[in-house]
Amino acid sequence: MYFPLISKPRGSLQRCAEGIGGASSGADGISAGTGEGGGSESGGGESGGGKGKGSSTSGEPSEVPLMSSSSMSLGKSSATAYGDGGGESIVIPDSQLFAGRSAGGRTRGQIFGNRTYGSRYPGITGYGISGRGFPFWFWPVVWSDTAAQSQPYLNSSEYGDTSNMSCFGGPLMEATIISNSSSPNTTFHILSDNSTIMSLIQSIDANCSHYLSSSSSSMPMPFDVSSANAPQPEQAIQYYHTSSIVLTLDGYNNSTTFSSNTNVTDSPLPLNMDMNLSVCLNQTIAEAVPLVDGALPSSFVTPPLASVAALTMVISFLLSSF
């Protein structure tokens, strides 16, 4: 059910939410962004495509369990949807995967990359994700070996395949988001880990249902990178979370993805895409995507279900003793 959304984005995200960020000229009606690692601090600029009806998002912080053996061993078992992120960065200990690399520390205001794989890692410029840390804890999305053969910076083999259960948040999953507008026919895909996608599907349904076709995903599907119908890196219109989340658009083909010419600019997005849905998706991901917090907000204290059950049993026992 659709409810009018009345809340406004926080701080620096207000501008980000007005369009899909990217290193384009802005001529396609989508805002441009340049800066550290190829992405701006705010992602989208003030001259973006504008807000559509229902483009503001609302939601309360909620705990999102992490499906990952490696995350549990690092003492992180959950993230927070609509949380702020942050906390101190750590060095992954010798006994763990990717020992010696850094993890954590980034906040929601730093979530945007652009249309380039590996954009906006803190303190790092250039393409790709090889050898890098995990500023948001989550691992980058994995593209196919075929893509990596065409452009080495797309090589993600060090993170295993898409079904890798050690991935922070679980294996890679895909959600298909389809516009209910008959003209144009706009289909997006969101790729990320299982925990993130499960949470985002709920947030998108809550915030963007007015624009969604009934054919949109209600549950995620495993990302089959070898499928002929799988989203491709040249279809990426926005990376987030240091490339651990990507939003793709069917029919889009970015000329810069496989180009060796660093002076080539991103191909413009289709002028007839459903801008209302694209803006709502971009803003919802920016506001709602689960982040690992240094500490949970003081206003959000929810005991685990197991603790609630145990407490209920204790109270029942005490009452029966009288």
Image (tube, helix red, strand yellow):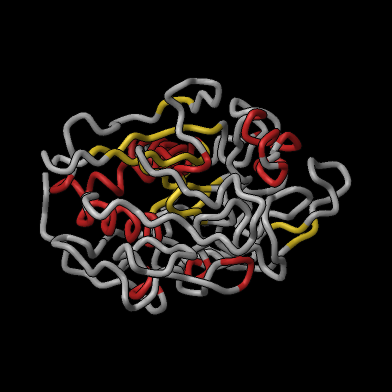
Which image quadrant for residue 68? top right
Q: Is residue 1 above or below residue 288?
A: above
Q: Residue at x 71, y 65 (%)?
A: 89
Q: Toward the viewer: 147 or 203?
A: 147
Look at 47% across and 25% down and name the residue there: 222
Left or right: where does residue 240 sit relative to residue 219? right
Residue closest to the eye, 90 or 251: 251
Instruction: State whether residue 289 is above or below residue 48.
Output: above
Residue appearing at x 73%, y 34% in the figure: 157
> Residue 227, how many percent across, how many down?
49, 20
Left or right relative to 284: residue 262: right
Q: Residue 62, image x and y in percent? A: 39, 53
Residue 249, percent across and down? 37, 43
Question: On the picture, is 153 further left or further right than 13?
Answer: right
Instruction: Answer with the quarter of the image where residue 197 lies.
Output: top left
Residue 223 appears in view: yes
Q: Is residue 304 visible?
A: no
